[in-house]
């Protein structure tokens, strides 16, 4: 038995939802946090917290790890290519601090890593794209083709755009930045 040291009232706190693995596909998101952490092999990885900014899964988070310092040169090359793709997607080409990448929209091709070695299935990122109209269209369809599985991400914007333009002029900021 453990004394909490205070009276906790569960009626005042929203219960945590079960976060199942997201379906593979393209998602609009932004990096909200980042930090360098030591790896178990003596290297260092950049851990990115990514938050989905639109659609059915808005607010959900994904974490990505980039092994920027590692004895395995191939792991370092993969991490550097991924970091370069992120930099190109957010148009920050000279980065000294990972905070330069924060709060800038981009699109990630999210994959599902199958359960293995006692770990549950998880999400990872298989690619990065610039957040633009052409790439946003990819968010409506799954990565493997076929029927859209995340159609809600694109459809409301297409249907609502003419009314929004007539009712209230946009300040030029993306929908996620306008508080919608």
Image (cartoon, rainbow, N blue to C red):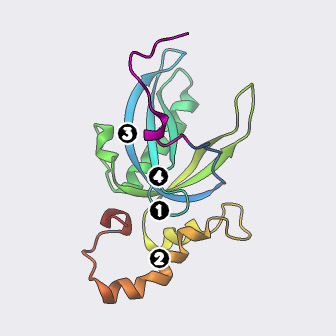
Q: Earlier in the sequence, mark 3 or mark 4?
A: 3
First in sequence: mark 4 vs mark 1: 1
Question: For the residues marked 3 and 1, what is the alpha-carbon distance in whole angstroms?
Answer: 18 Å
In the picture of the structure, the residue carrying the numbered disc 1 is 54
How far is the residue under mark 2 from the one under mark 3? 27 Å
Whether residue 32 is in magenta: the answer is no
Describe the element under mark 2 as helix, strand or loop: helix
Up-down relation of residue 45 to residue 27 (above or below): above
Q: CA distance from mark 2 to mark 1?
A: 10 Å
- Whole-angstrom CA distance, mark 4 to mark 2, is 17 Å
Stretch in magenta: 1-16
Sequence-wise first label, 4 or 2:
4
**Label 1 SS:** loop
- Which of these two is toward me, 93 or 25? 25
Label 2–label 1 contact, CB within 8 A = yes
| Residue occupied by mark 4 | 59
| Circle 2 or circle 3, nearest the eye | 2
Image quarter of residue 78: top right
Task: Report, in whole angstroms, how far the alpha carbon at label 3 lies from the one at label 4.
Answer: 14 Å
Residue topped by disc 2: 157
Q: CA distance from mark 4 to mark 1?
A: 8 Å
The one of 151 and 138 positioned closer to us in this rendering? 151
- Residue 63 showing in the rendered view: yes
Precedes in sequence: disc 2 or disc 1? 1
Q: Residue at x 54, y 15 (%)?
A: 41
**Mark before the other along the chain sequence, 2 or 3:** 3
Q: Main secondary structure of the magenta part?
A: loop
The residue shown at (48%, 20%) is 43
Q: Quadrant of the C terminus?
A: bottom left
């Amino acid at each position: 038995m453990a004394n909490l040291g205070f009276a906790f009232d569960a009626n005042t706190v929203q219960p945590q939802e079960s976060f199942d693995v997201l379906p593979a596909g393209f998602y609009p998101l932004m990096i909200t946090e980042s930090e360098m952490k030591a790896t178990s092999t003596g290297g260092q990885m950049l851990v990115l917290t990514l938050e989905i900014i639109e659609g059915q899964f808005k607010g959900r988070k994904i974490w990505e790890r980039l092994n920027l310092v590692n004895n395995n040169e191939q792991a370092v090359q993969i991490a550097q290519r991924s970091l370069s793709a992120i930099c190109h997607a957010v148009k920050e080409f000279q980065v000294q601090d990972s905070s330069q990448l924060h709060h800038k929209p981009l699109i990630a091709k999210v994959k599902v890593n199958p359960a293995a070695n006692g770990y549950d299935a998880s999400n990872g990122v298989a690619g990065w794209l610039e957040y633009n109209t052409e790439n946003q269209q990819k968010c409506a369809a799954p990565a493997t083709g076929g029927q859209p599985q995340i159609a809600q991400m694109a459809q409301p914007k297409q249907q609502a755009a003419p009314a929004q333009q007539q009712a209230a002029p946009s300040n030029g900021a993306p929908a996620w930045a306008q508080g919608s």
